[in-house]
Image (cartoon, helix red, strand yellow):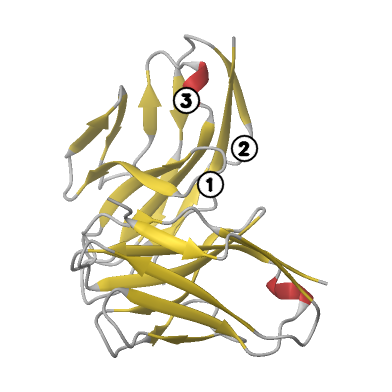
Amino acid sequence: GDSVTQMEGPVTLSEEAFLTINCTYTATGYPSLFWYVQYPGEGLQLLLKATKADDKGSNKGFEATYRKETTSFHLEKGSVQVSDSAVYFCALTPNSGNTPLVFGKGTRLSVIA
Amino acid sequence: NAGVTQTPKFRVLKTGQSMTLLCAQDMNHEYMYWYRQDPGMGLRLIHYSVGEGTTAKGEVPDGYNVSRLKKQNFLLGLESAAPSQTSVYFCASSLAGVDGELFFGEGSRLTVL
């Protein structure tokens, strides 16, 4: 079945460091890809998405590019802030039917001042 | 705009007791979902609904039942709670289709002793 694999955490960075969180997927067809973020004590919220190959999703300084050739959707940010400390989830929806989102296990990011 | 509201937010149960988690959304969304979040496991789909009066099983449905009698409400029931059901439960809704952004509630923390 369809699945998402993302890098194990936790990731600890200093403020203004560059962030990459790796995400690869396995899916038949052409899935849509998402990054969701969960801040402490809250539910998840959509950070960005891409619906076809080579699309780049971006929001709040975060970016991710849908790479069909490498089946990847890595999350990047050039300069992280303490307020970016959260758990980040990569997810996909299959191309067909009404099958709901499949989430990765999440990567916890801690940014220290 | 309340969005997605879950009640209760915290609950402690003894093994064998029953309870119902209520999810209410005020966005007129067709799709609703129940996920559980466990350390190291990410989010796993329990049940979901693609419209009033419909329900479907997700990845981990055993031990849970759901009902969607009204479009705005999605109930998750535990008939006989077990310690393995100790988790944080998240409800989510989306407008339509699997590409739609999911809106999450703040979560319900359930402990089964």
Say which element carries label 2. loop
Label 3 marks a residue whose chain is A
Among numbered discs 3 and 2, the one appearing first in the sequence: 2
The tag on residue A9 is: 2
Relative to residue B80, is residue B67 drawn left or right?
Answer: left
Label 1 marks a residue whose chain is A
The residue at which mark 3 appears reads as: A84
Among numbered discs 2 and 1, the one appearing first in the sequence: 2
Q: Give the residue displayed 29% in from the left and 50% down from the top.
A: A33
Label 2 marks a residue whose chain is A
Q: Is residue A71 visible?
A: no
Q: Which percent across, then down, holds residue B73? A: 35, 76
Mark 3 vs mark 2, foreground winner is 3
Q: Which percent across, then down, holds residue B59? A: 50, 76
Residue B29 drawn above or below residue A79 = below
Q: Give the residue displayed 29% in from the left and 67% down from the top.
A: A28
The residue at which mark 1 appears reads as: A106
Circle 1 packing at 10 Å, graded few (<14), some (14-19), many (20+), is many
Say which element carries label 3. helix
Residue A78 drawn above or below residue A105 = above
Between B82 and B17, the residue placed more toward the observer is: B17
Q: Mark 3 vs mark 2: same chain?
A: yes
**Disc 1 residue type (three-letter):** Gly
Circle 3 packing at 10 Å, graded few (<14), some (14-19), many (20+), is some
Number of numbered callouts drawn: 3
Task: Determine the image quadrant of residue A63.
Answer: top left
Whether residues under marks 2 and 1 lie with C-beta atoms below 8 angstroms apart, the answer is: yes
Residue A89 drawn above or below residue A57 = below
Q: Give the residue displayed 36% in from the left and 87% down from the top.
A: B55
Which quadrant would the C terminus of chain A be assigned to in this image?
A: top right
**Disc 2 residue type (three-letter):** Gly
